[in-house]
Image (cartoon, coloured by chain):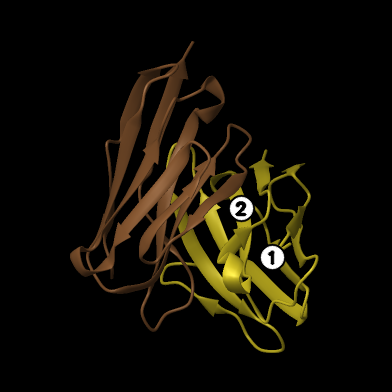
Amino acid sequence: GIQVEQSPPDLILQEGANSTLRCNFSDSVNNLQWFHQNPWGQLINLFYIPSGTKQNGRLSATTVATERYSLLYISSSQTTDSGVYFCAVEVTGRRALTFGSGTRLQVQP
Amino acid sequence: GAVVSQHPSWVICKSGTSVKIECRSLDFQATTMFWYRQFPKQSLMLMATSNEGSKATYEQGVEKDKFLINHASLTLSTLTVTSAHPEDSSFYICSALAGDYGYTFGSGTRLTVV
């Protein structure tokens, strides 16, 4: 099956810092989404981005499908950005998402 | 739009009993829903795909007789953990594909079997 690798696995930032999270995938995908899982387990859909670039406030994402990677940028980080960020992909020809292992982000005041 | 409601949020049950978890699409119809399981500090793993009006499709290694899935309407799928044991304790979360919104997820159910 498809491999979805995220880096770094853990990240500690000071409030106000910027960061880039990476997601590599091993096969063609129809869909790619970025999620933030808060401490209560809720998955917040950040971006639905099978290709191209999108921005939403302090967050932006870029997917280069031909090179099989996606990047999530977080600017001016806040303590509320803490949690786990997951990249998930839908493989061509198969419904359902396959999740990466996640990046655990801690933003310190 | 594209809200998935999941209940209960948490449940504690005795070993050997059964627990039912509900997943509802509130403002869209979902012919297909998905059930995931997440152990502490791990990623989400797909357990099964629930299809309205037909049998669910289970991933390899998931016991279909233990995890009963029913998708009787276009807005409701249920997961029943039968004869639960402590090793079934986990975070269960459902999902549905909601058009342009992509996959949207319920808030999850934390199951503890004692």
Kindly give the residue lying farthest to the left in the view shown.
Answer: A67
- SS of the residue under disc 2: strand
Horizontal side, residue B53 vs residue B88: left or right: right
Q: Which of B59 and B106 is in front in this view?
A: B106
* Rendered-image quadrant of the C terminus of chain B: top right
- Does the rendering let one see residue B34? no
Q: Which of A15 and B53 is in front in this view?
A: A15
Q: Which amino acid does label 2 sit on?
A: Tyr
Give the yellow chain's letter.
B
Residue at image location 45% in from the left, 72% down from the top: B59
* Rendered-image quadrant of the N terminus of chain B: bottom right
Residue at image location 45% in from the left, 16% down from the top: A15
Residue at image location 75% in from the left, 73% down from the top: B28
Q: Which mark is residue B79?
A: 1
Percent coordinates x, y for residue B37 in the rendering? 53, 54
Dot 2: within a 10 Å radius of its alpha carbon, few (fewer than 14), some, or many (20 or more) residues? Answer: many
Horizontal side, residue B5 vs residue B87: left or right: right
> Which of the 4 image quadrants contains residue A67?
bottom left
Give the brown chain's letter.
A
Please report, as a chain letter, where disc 2 is located. Answer: B
- SS of the residue under disc 1: strand
Q: Residue A12 carries which label?
A: none
Kindly give the residue lying farthest to the bottom in the view shown.
Answer: B54
Percent coordinates x, y for residue A104 in the rendering? 40, 33
Q: What residue type is labelled 1?
A: Leu
Tell me if residue A2 comes above or below residue A33 in the rendering.
below
Say which residue label 2 marks: B92
Percent coordinates x, y for residue A82 in the rendering? 50, 27
Marks 1/2 in contact by CB < 8 Å: the verdict is: yes
Whether labels 1 and 2 share one chain: yes
